[in-house]
Amino acid sequence: MLRKFLLQASIRRNFTASSSSFVFLRQCSSSSSSSSQIPNGHFVEHLEKSAESPPSATISVDRTALYNPPGSIKIYSYDSVFFFSFYVYCEGWICLYVEHSHEPSAESVLVKNLKNIIKFRGGPITVSEYMEEVLTNPKAGYYINRDVFGADGDFITSPEVSQMFGEMIGVWAMCLWEQMGKPNKVNLVELGPGRGTLLADLLHGASKFKNFTDSLHIHMIECSPALQKLQYENLKCATEDGADENEKRINSTIAESPVSWHAMLEQVPTGLPTIIIAHEFFDALPLHQFQKASRGWCEKMVDVTENSSFRFVLSPQPTPATLYLMKRFKWAETEEIARLNHIEVCPKAIDLTQEISKRIAIDGGGALIIDYGVNGIVSNSLQAIRKHKFVDILDNPGSADLSAYVDFAAIRHSAEEVPGASVHGPMTQSQFLGSLGINFRVEALLDNCTEEQAEYLRTGYWRLVGEGEAPFWEGPDDQTPIGMGTRYLAMAIVNQKQGIPVPFQ
Ligand code: SAH
């Protein structure tokens, strides 16, 4: 079946996009970064060092409002970026703050909104709240009103790199469906479908396997009305009147499958076996950041200074998210924790994993999670990308994508807590796609294409499965295709009764 699937589709992607146009992958695998963690401009650890630098003349005022302490203020400058440290002595403990000044020229709706939240809260917000507002605020969030992908957007993802990606996910889904006993009704859920390209390619590739496509009820979990519209178009949807006057039924004409949209997974009807796909969704979930200080682990928060710019501060006492930090520590080795000065914890990823696992344990089916990440604790990876370049996380919020490495070990532990669900992987994207037969697929496509299309295919293939810079590249250095093959990991959660899913055996 696999081989048949690989050979049956023909090249149909619009090849107008130039393979040499510069595109930025969210995984940050450019040769400049050798570490598995992403460097950014906001290491609060610099604070402790900055305390030894000479003082400058600017004053930072604490607005955390968690207490009103008598304080001694020390202000330091570092190049054009200001790092402030503010030592507050209160009941024997020391509180340390940092500022990184950012003042957008004209305040956007989102910036005003963030400042209002901080003002009315009477203190700083968590990085998680900041991230959630920035990405998904219903009026002005980064994803809400626009198409952010591709050469004209901010970054590119695997489904946009090559049709082969969605086709291979289709192979995986069909193999899983076979292992599920070929049920005649299945929920196919995609979390965060972007432009809808992955599913469109999956349906095109699978369209000859009628038993499979006829079973599908497609559910798109998408917060962005703009992207919902694009998904509707890319899935070639048609709307028909339903049984009663107010009911509308939407079908993807690619495979005649019904499609519906939801804000969250809970809204997808239960009771049917379910296949869930999450590609680059977990990396966009809001996370909490903690930093080790002399008084222990403190949560990093976002505050506004007197001169109205955003800055990071450290919480003076444990915050509610500390519960999740403790949970994460229970899953880690003592030595792993001892090595860390920063840590990222994503309660939404942990909770979502449990929800996915419970659904699969009860209804049957499986989930595939592919993202850039590591199989262990993530230290300090939150990054902002605008127009294919890293920018500061606090710079003009809402105008850049925010994402972070996914902690696959936390996902595994979280799923393992659910009886009836089994977890497999992670394995690298390169192993995953290779085992599913991407090599056969690229060969079949190369047999039947123009030279321009061949270059596009080879570049796309490298991006999906390669590691580091493409050795065959002859174009400008700064446009060298970077492989996503090892930085991206694939993990599956399936109903235990179905056995081990392809290709994790
Ligand atoms: N899977 C796609 C897009 C990844 S970007 C691809 O690989 O190309 C993240 C996607 O998740 C976007 O579609 C974004 O709008 C959506 N998204 C982010 N946070 C969300 C949330 N909390 N609820 C629903 N959708 C969300």
Image (cartoon, rainbow, N blue to C red):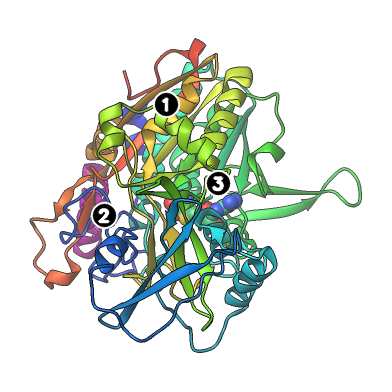
| Magenta stretch, main secondary structure class | helix
Hey, what amino acid is under mark 2?
Gly
Point out the tag, 2 or 3, that comes first from the N-terminus.
Answer: 3
| Residue 189 screen position, x and y as percent | 58, 38
Hey, what amino acid is under mark 3?
Thr
| Residue 292 screen position, x and y as percent | 35, 47
Q: Is residue 100 magenta?
A: no
- Give residue 106's quadrant in the image: bottom right
Q: Of discs 2 and 3, which sits in the foreground?
A: 3
| Residue 314 screen position, x and y as percent | 45, 57
Write down the region rendered in magenta. Answer: 443-464
Name the outermost residue toward the top: 497
Q: Disc 3 designates what residue?
A: 319
Q: Disc 1 designates what residue?
A: 330
Instruction: Work out how far the residue at label 2 is from the one at label 3, CA to CA, in angstroms.
Output: 44 Å
Label at residue 460: 2
Q: Of discs 1 and 3, which sits in the foreground?
A: 3
Write the residue at 58% across / 43% down: 320
Write the residue at 64% across / 26% down: 185
Q: Are marks 1 and 3 in contact (CB under 8 Å)?
A: no
Element class at badge 3: loop
Q: Is residue 75 visible?
A: yes
